[in-house]
Image: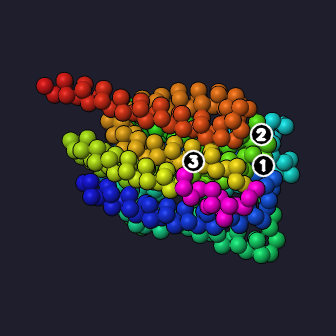
Amino acid sequence: MIRRALTNTGWLMGARGINAVFSLVYLAVATRALGLEGFGQFILAFTFTQSVVGFCSFQTWQGIVRWGQDKAQLPDATGFALALDGLTIVVGTVVAGALLALSGDWLPLSPDLRVATFALTVVALLSIRNTPIGILRLHDRYAKAASAESLTSTVRVVGALLLAFLAPSILGFIVVWALAEVATAVAFWSLARGVQPLFWSHVSLTRIPAQEPKAWSFVFGTSLSAAVVTASRQLLVLLVGVLGGAALAGIYRVAMQIGEGLLKLAQALLKATYPELVRSPEAAKAIAGRITRIAIITGLGAVALAFLGGRWLIGVIAGDDFLTAYTPMILLSAAAAVELVGASLEALLLARGKAMTNFLLRAVPTVIALLALGWLIAVHGVAGAGMAVLGASSVTVLGLYLANRRFEKRETRSSQ
């Protein structure tokens, strides 16, 4: 089971490794083609899209893995996920349109880019792929998922290079990013259909909740936890832009892109470990413990590399205009290392069905960090945003550890 979890993590990291390398390529192209202010405007548009999708979408892949283990329940689990995706598209479109129309000057996004940003958001919502991802993970088709996921960065790199040689513009980059979303979504849905039927006739928001009394609690708990992660990453970029302008948002995004590589590994660990913990609750503690020890060693090594080579890497990729991203990059690397250690603890908590507990452990530190952001940026500049993320991640992971210990003691007492 541990071997399978690590193998699945390897497939996920293979795709994310390709994406990480390619992301540095298109980051270099975009920063140099658009300049400090232009790149900041593009990042605000893209981050707005990611924020809306992150806040409005449901983590339907976790529901499919949880309830799809029972083959008799699989059609209803898939139909429930499809219904939630449809709800996401409708709500997300309305929210994006309202925010862009009513935000006024507080959102430092050029009025000329707001229609394009809305279009990108709608495309991203229509390209939601949590359901096919859940199907592929349920059936251990991690290799197929990895091949589909690599399309995102591949399309971005090819498109960015073409734009750089032909006619670089913010609108052009928005179009390329939209095409990348569509290509990846088409690949995921095609692969999922090849693994199992999609059960469109079972699309319903009521069937699974009728069979599983705590279904809505689980759905909202996992989704709200994901929304908190969105708030601590994507929304933070928008707030940096609101407080410091588009250029500062661009600098922070460079720091985040380079410094948070470990966060992708943490997310891969969560996604690969969670199915194994659901399938084998009796071995959950052993699996989580061994993966956590691996994560600690990996995280320390990656932070050391970022400290030693980060300034050089920023200069090579983005240029000297972005060197102020070095300090926040170190802070974000440390935050990602902390999240890496906490990934298996989070998966263990979710496998116990404690989705709302997980949400609260993420929400409270994140809200405090966001409230302190204005003061941190005023005192420490863009590094203040990195401090906010590191503080929130540290408190969250400590909370995950204490919560798991508490539930473990309860389980031990109840079994005696």
- Are the residues tagged 1 and 2 within 8 Å (C-beta)? yes
Amino acid tagged 2: Gly
Who comes first in sequence, dot 1 or dot 3? 1
Label 2, secondary structure: give it.
helix
The percent position of residue 24, horizontal first and vertical second, equals: 61, 63
Q: How many residues crowd mark 2 within 10 Å: few (<14), some (14–19), many (20+)? A: some
Label 3, secondary structure: give it.
helix
Q: Nearer the viewer, mark 2 or mark 3?
A: 3
Determine the CA span between mark 2 and mark 3.
Answer: 20 Å
Amino acid tagged 3: Ile
Residue 128 seen in the current view: no
- Left or right: 46 in relation to 209: right
Question: Which residue lies at the image location 59% right of the left edge and 37% below the top edge?
Answer: 387
Question: Which residue lies at the image location 54% right of the left edge and 38% below the top edge?
Answer: 390
Which residue is under mark 3? 330
Determine the CA span between mark 1 and mark 3.
Answer: 20 Å
Above or below, 65 relative to 176? above
Checking the image for residue 244, the label placed there is 2
Amino acid tagged 1: Ala
Q: Which residues are magenta?
A: 307-321
Label 1, secondary structure: give it.
helix
Above or below, 257 relative to 167? above
Who comes first in sequence, dot 2 or dot 3? 2
The percent position of residue 329, horizontal first and vertical second, equals: 60, 49
Residue 314 lies in magenta, yes or no? yes
Which residue is under mark 1? 247
- Left or right: 8 in relation to 391: left
Work out whether residue 124 or residue 19 is closer to the camera in this orientation and state it.
Answer: 19
Question: Which residue lies at the image location 77% right of the left edge and 75% below the top edge?
Answer: 165
Q: How many residues crowd mark 3 within 10 Å: few (<14), some (14–19), many (20+)? A: many
- Are the residues tagged 1 and 3 within 8 Å (C-beta)? no
